[in-house]
Image (cartoon, helix red, strand yellow):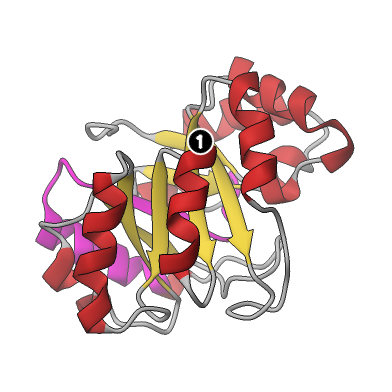
Amino acid sequence: MSNGKIIIAPSLLSADFKRLEQEISLVEKAGAEWLHLDIMDGHFVPNLTIGPSVVAFLRPATKLFFDAHLMVTDPEKYAQPFVEAGAQSISFHVEAVNGAKTKPLIDKIHALGAKVGLTINPDTPAEQVKPWLSEIDLVLVMSVFPGFAGQKFMPEVLSKVRQIRQWAGPDFDIEIDGGITTANVREAVDAGANVVVAGTAVFRAADPAEAIRQLKRIA
């Protein structure tokens, strides 16, 4: 995956949906490496976003790595359609899948050719992902409660990032998502995150390309 490099992953949720191709091209040219895809089902979180057809439409338009975050009650149902649409990494919530189903879903996503991430909400202990670290490719630590863009960063989750980094070692991808700005990105990276999701801070900025460059410089 990133081999320890700091990756900026703009979140499509905050983009202007009237001009998605232009928005994606802009952040790609500015140096973003990943595109974070927030997939919400209106049940696991109180919002609805995009389906596989949108991902499939966007896939030919960019070389960015498609990082899909499934905020859905039934990730077993949706993992394959999103991989087939072009997602290269699928992260699902430990809160949505009970222990017995976790390993089969990890294996299924890997068999489809995609990377696998486990996601934890701000109030979920880091210990919930510890048993799976040797089986997965990344952990996504939510620094807001998922469902809506533009929320305030919760610094208390950084202790979990530090703990996971200690367990997983230096070459494992730890992603952080929620309220990331130039004011706190350094904190997140210092704690051990190496993949930084930024939505509002990028797509709602006066100059999204410059926002990415600033995030990279500070991180």
Regarding mark 1 in the picture, which secondary structure is present there?
loop
| In-image side of 87 versus 40 (left or right) | left
- The C terminus - image quarter: top left
- Residue lying at the far right of the rendered structure: 18
Q: Which residue is mark 1?
A: 86
| Magenta span includes 91 | no
| In-image side of 20 versus 119 (left or right) | right
Seen at 63% across and 77% down, the residue is: 45
| Magenta span includes 165 | yes
Quadrant assignment, res 72: bottom right
- Going by the numbered disc 1, the residue's amino acid type is Gly
Front-lying residue, 62 or 81: 81
In the image, which residues are magenta?
Answer: 157-182
Q: Position of residue 105 (x, y in %)?
A: 29, 64
Front-lying residue, 15 or 69: 69
Q: Is residue 99 above or below residue 53?
A: below
Q: Position of residue 75 (x, y in %)?
A: 45, 67
Q: Position of residue 65 (x, y in %)?
A: 46, 31
Seen at 78% across and 23% down, the residue is: 22
Front-lying residue, 190 or 6: 6
Seen at 62% across and 35% down, the residue is: 56
Q: Position of residue 181 (x, y in %)?
A: 60, 49
